[in-house]
Amino acid sequence: MSVISVSKVLSGKDRLDAIGVIEAVFVKEKQWIASVHDQIPEKLDSNGEYSWFIARAGGIPAGVMRLHYEPQIELPESCHVQLAPGINLENLRLEGRYVEIGRFMILPEFRRQYLVALRLMRAATMEVVERDYTHFITDVFDGEEHSPLNFHTRVLGFEIIGSHLFGELNCSSTRIILTLDILKLYNRVKDSRSRIYQELTGGLRGVFERNRAAFRAQT
């Protein structure tokens, strides 16, 4: 298996490689967007609202992920949102600080290398925790051939909070809205011997401990 590496998209080369992945998957394969124009801004180092990550397998671009910090949880009425029973948006806002996972894609030839997705998730989680965010929120397509819905819910522990029919991507599938409490996931799997969970949480113990120590120092 190829060596899998993940880096934050900051350089011009990283940006071009990430755009190449987006074009291959979202434009040509899925046809969910018309072009890659303006998908990733040219200057990312000063952009605090978004982070992009690129995964490489043996040095070859393999996958991409975008993080959106503090997104609007409410969606327009035109999206036809239906929340799950007992879900209240105001309560969600009070529960933590959210980061949206988007543009999460793997090139077809690397989709069987599960480490690509796990390493992207690990890198994203480390940055989110370092920045004192507590929850992920994301949409996944229901019934789409390569939807990560089952993996997100069964393996990672994402919870379904609702759905909506329309969004920015040109896809007819229903969007399932998911949230994940990152600390809850970490506490559940930190001592697991599963290679999947070890890959996901590798390096996170130190991040959580640093954050706890900083919190104790402030109090």
Image: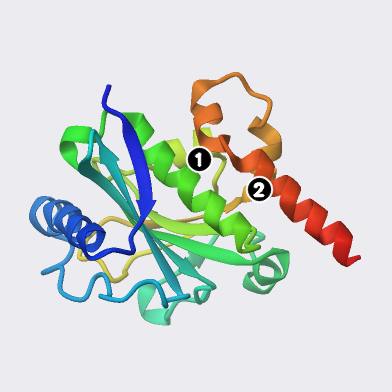
Which quadrant would the N terminus be assigned to in this image?
top left
Above or below 197: residue 213: below
Quadrant of the rendered structure where residue 103 is?
A: bottom left
Q: Indicate the position of residue 104 as horizontal and vertical percent values.
A: 33, 52
Report which residue position mark 2 lands on: 207
Quadrant of the rendered structure where residue 136 is?
A: bottom right
Above or below 181: residue 43: below
Q: Element type at marker 1?
A: helix
Q: Nearer the viewer, residue 29 or 23?
A: 23
Query: Callout 2, which amino acid?
Result: Val
Q: Residue at x 67, y 60 (%)?
A: 86
186 lies left or right of 161: right
Evaluate whether residue 160 shows in this view: no
Above or below 202: residue 214: below
Q: Element type at marker 2?
A: helix
Q: Residue at x 41, y 65 (%)?
A: 51
123 lies left or right of 185: left
Q: Indicate the position of residue 106 as horizontal and vertical percent values.
A: 26, 44
Identify the disc placed on residue 153. Answer: 1
Q: Residue furthest left?
A: 28
Evaluate whether residue 4 shows in this view: yes
Q: Indicate the position of residue 10 as horizontal and vertical percent values.
A: 33, 64
Query: Callout 1, which amino acid?
Result: Thr
Q: CA distance from mark 2 to mark 1?
A: 24 Å
1 lies left or right of 95: left
